[in-house]
Image (tube, helix red, strand yellow):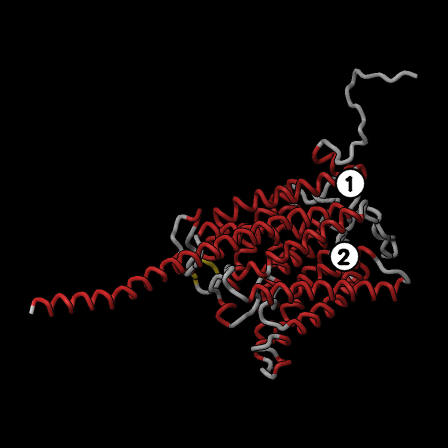
Amino acid sequence: MKKKIISFIIVLALMLIPTFVFAADEEINAATKMAINTVWTLIAGFLVFFMQAGFAMVETGLTRAKNAGNIIMKNLMDFAIGSVAFFAVGFAFMFGADQGGFIGLSGFFAMDPMEHLGLGIPLEAFIIFQTVFAATAATIVSGAMAERTKFIAYVIYSAVISLIIYPVVGHWAWGGGWLSKLGFIDFAGSTVVHSVGGWAALVGAAIIGPRIGKFNKDGKPNAIPGHSITLAALGVFILWFGWFGFNPGSTLAGTDMNIGKISMTTNLAGAAAACVAMIITWIRYGKPDVSMTLNGALAGLVAITAGCNAVSMIGSLFIGIIAGFIVVFGVEFVEKVLKIDDPVGAIGVHALCGSSGTLMVGLFATETGLFYGKGFHQLGVQAIGVGAVALWVVATTFVLFTVIKHTVGLRVERDHEEVGLDINEHGSEAYADFHIKTSDTLFTS
């Protein structure tokens, strides 16, 4: 009898060994998966952070040398200020526990566990990834208002965008708010990030007015060339590179095999839009325009950001082609019809192409799009989202810029603008011509 009992125990133990091994393997696999996803999200976030350098180079290159230091300072500080503001308040408004579909109200200073998010990565990794997105939305505004904005004004409105204006939109679409419940698709932020920056840029540029000499008395615009197309091109290449973190990284999962498809749709849209912008300017102006072609690439990248995971590679080509047309004629519309001075084309690239790209998800999404026989529902939801975000940003930034204008002031003095913001706002020059500036140095022949 004892032998039978012992034999039974041995057989039972042998049967249970695979169960214990399998459980151990599952635990290892789960830990490995989390590690891969965490590393992937961090690397993607670092790529998006590097886009700050891209924006800085684009804006510096497309503006005049006398304001280059001011541009760099603004791009530096909107990330620095935005990082603190978003960590302290903005993240909670965006991803905190939902309050009526409008805003979140938990997680200030990352003090709460935020278990409702169901993250497969550490909270800190998620916060840094979302921080670099918030900084992108804020930095878009600086290009449209370049060369005539007070630095103190920029510091204020950049902080407010990161604190409340952007996070509220983010909560609607990504934080469990009312747009996400409707089924709104904006995978990586054509509307949430880019159109927020673009609409804010439109309002700010309209309120601050054009640069001195931009328009004649009859309203005809004059070209004010930037000082370095080379820097602008470098910026576009950096931004394009960063977009491979921006879009595929929004999966938050290196184990998600869709990152390959997302990378392809992202690249194809940017390439197609650049080609279209080049062809249009070649036909209309007689020569292919460099700066417009650079903006064409950015337009395609902005437009595909909403649906990069939802459309096919062929669909992404069409989205890029349409974005190429929108950016060329959109930039001209803003300047010639609206009489708004946007030195870098930020409104056309980010507001118009961000919004249109979001709408095109309703056409080209393979699972829910109109062109795939799924009806108008998704297109309608996309239109509601685009319209609501535009209204929110236009209304809030109008109040913001108006208050700044009548308090600390929005625009620099005329003589400061003529001499340049580097000297008058920062007491230095980006290109100092290597002058010896000691007062006791004399040059004799």
Provide residue 377's location: percent of width, then percent of height: 57, 79
Q: Is residue 98 left or right of residue 340?
A: left
Q: Residue at x 83, y 49 (%)?
A: 225
Indicate the secondary structure of the residue bearing disc 1: helix
Q: Could you tell me how far apart the alpha carbons at marks 2 and 1 are, in whole angstroms? A: 27 Å
Task: Name the residue carrying label 2.
Answer: 294
Q: Residue at x 57, y 76 (%)?
A: 378
Q: Is residue 132 above or below residue 326?
A: above
Q: Nearer the viewer, mark 2 or mark 1?
A: 2
Task: Name the residue carrying label 1.
Answer: 417
Kind of residue at badge 2 = Leu
Marking on residue 34: none
**Is residue 390 something one can see in this rendering?**
no
Indicate the secondary structure of the residue bearing disc 2: helix
Q: Residues within 10 Å of mark 1 (few under 14, many from 20)?
A: many
Res 409 → quadrant: top right
Provide residue 293's location: percent of width, then percent of height: 79, 59
Q: Is residue 355 above or below residue 212?
A: below
User: Going by the picture, which residue comes out furthest to the left?
Assistant: 1
Q: Answer with mark 2 or mark 1, whichever residue precedes in sequence.
A: 2
Q: Please state which of residues 23 and 127 is positioned toward the viewer in this rendering.
A: 23
Provide residue 169's location: percent of width, then percent of height: 55, 60
Q: In which quadrant will I find the N terminus?
A: bottom left
Kind of residue at badge 1 = Glu
Q: Residues within 10 Å of mark 2 (few under 14, many from 20)?
A: many
Q: Residue at x 77, y 20 (%)?
A: 438
